[in-house]
Amino acid sequence: PTMMESFISFFTKKNQIVLDPFCGIGSTLVGCDRTERKGIGIELNEKYAKISRLRTKQKVIIGDSRKIKEIWKENGLPKINFCISSPPYWDILNRSTGKFKEIREKNGFDINYSKKDKDLGNISNYKIFLDEICKIYEDTYDLMEEGAYICIIVKNIKKKGKLYPLAWNIAERLSNKFALKDERIWCQ
């Protein structure tokens, strides 16, 4: 929430609309609470949406972000001033092995996003995953105020010894609608 709060404060003013199309457990929405913004989160996994609702009073919609335009219209939602999200990092959780898997299980963390076929984290084909994730952000563009910003927190992925430049591929694909302004490297 602290990192999200920092981005939200920088890119928006009080009472503006912030979207997280991959809401998860609600860190973006907590950042909205802390900065007096109006947050809207979309989350496919009901378990995570429940956790989100416990953490914030912001709007949490259980749904598939691939239908974001329909969701927006059905709910009569306003234009977005800022979009920030950390989407699934491809199928990384499904590939949890060794110590990583053991530590996640020991701490009660999920080792996959969900069992749902429509979950983007369950797509094994990189190109299809990239197409789906970028389509969501392209559709989001059409719901944004002119001059609004988007921030995508993502990392490059290594799978079976091959590096997939996910962050760069998303940036390049989205440059058809968005102008890439900057990048920030976050060392965890």
Image (cartoon, rainbow, N blue to C red):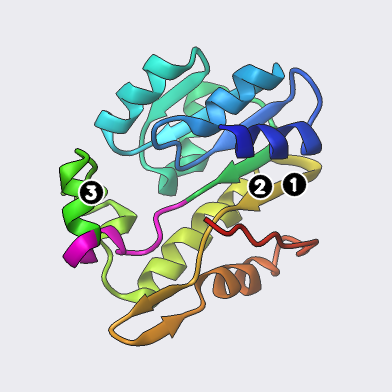
Q: Which residue is mark 2?
A: 142
Res. 19 image quadrant: top right
Q: Who comes first in sequence, dot 3 or dot 2?
A: 3
Task: Identify residue for label 3.
Answer: 104
Q: Position of residue 91 (x, y in %)?
A: 30, 64
Q: Could you tell me residue 38's position as x and y percent?
A: 64, 20
First-in-chain label (1 vs 3): 3
* Side of 41 relative to 140 (left or right): left
Q: Read off the residue under disc 1.
A: 149
Spatial CA distance of label 2 from label 1 is 12 Å
Name the mark nearer the viewer: 3 or 2: 3
Give the residues drawn in magenta, as a range.
Answer: 87-99
- The vertical placement of 95 against 121, above or below, is below
Q: Residue at x 76, y 31 (%)?
A: 9
**Label 3 crowding class (10 Å Cα cut-off): few <14, some 14-19, many 20+?**
some
Q: CA distance from mark 1 to mark 3?
A: 33 Å
